[in-house]
């Protein structure tokens, strides 16, 4: 398994799947027993847990999201990927900036994802040069 390739596939898939709310594409990246921490206080266990999390989040979004993902930073079987998104909740724009820490299994699937993010009301463009 090449961690850089797995992380780049993860970022590409999120870039394509989040705006169209493609739960299947995103859950396919996760190992059956992989954990997704929406925050350190909100663990979602396994692929089925990730599916629940995504369905909850996507149900709140009223328009397609605009998303940007940076080039993954890789070390061993782990990667960090920064992201920026503008979503609409009840038709009001909300900007989310964050970073997901990923650990991949030998098959290149996510064994653990820990998401750290900040949310601000409004439509805010990402900083210049961050996602080029």
Image: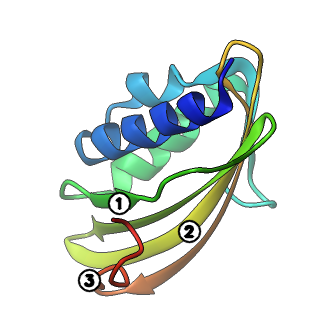
Residue 68, label in figure: 1
Image quadrant in which you'd find residue 13: top left
Tag shown at residue 48: none
Instruction: Specify few, some or many for label 3: CA neighbours under 10 Å numbering under 14, 14-19, or 20 or more.
Output: some
Crowdedness near tag 2: few (<14), some (14–19) or many (≥20) residues, C-alpha within 10 Å:
some
Q: Which mark is residue 123?
A: 3
Q: CA distance from mark 1 to mark 2?
A: 11 Å
Position of residue 93 measured from the top left corner of the image (x, y, whole percent): 26, 77
Which element is circle 2 on? Answer: strand
| Quadrant housing residue 115 | bottom right
Within 10 Å of disc 1 (Cα), the crowding (few <14, some 14-19, many 20+) is: many
Q: What is the C-alpha distance between the residues marked 3 and 1?
A: 14 Å
Q: Contact, CB < 8 Å: mark 2 with mark 3?
A: no
Task: Name the N-terminal-most of marks 2 and 3.
Answer: 2
Is residue 56 placed above or below 94 in the rendered structure?
above
- Number of numbered discs visible in the structure rendering: 3
Q: Is residue 123 visible?
A: yes
Does label 3 or label 1 sit earlier along the sequence? 1
| Residue 128 pos. (x, y %) | 33, 83
Mark number displayed over residue 98 = 2
Q: Nearer the viewer, residue 91 or 98?
A: 98
Q: Is residue 27 left or right of residue 17?
A: right
Q: Nearer the viewer, residue 103 or 56?
A: 103
């Amino acid at each position: 398994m090449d961690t850089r390739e797995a992380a780049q596939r993860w970022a590409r898939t999120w870039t394509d799947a989040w705006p169209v709310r493609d739960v299947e594409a995103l859950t396919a990246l996760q190992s059956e027993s992989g954990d997704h921490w929406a925050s350190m206080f909100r663990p979602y266990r396994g692929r089925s847990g990730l599916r629940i999390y995504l369905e909850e989040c996507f149900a709140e979004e009223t328009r397609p999201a605009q998303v940007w993902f940076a080039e993954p930073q890789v070390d061993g079987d782990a990667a960090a990927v920064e992201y920026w998104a503008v979503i609409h909740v009840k038709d009001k724009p909300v900007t989310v900036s964050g970073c997901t820490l990923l650990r991949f299994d030998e098959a290149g699937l996510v064994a653990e994802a820990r998401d750290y993010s900040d949310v601000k009301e409004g439509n805010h463009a990402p900083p210049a040069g961050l996602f080029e």
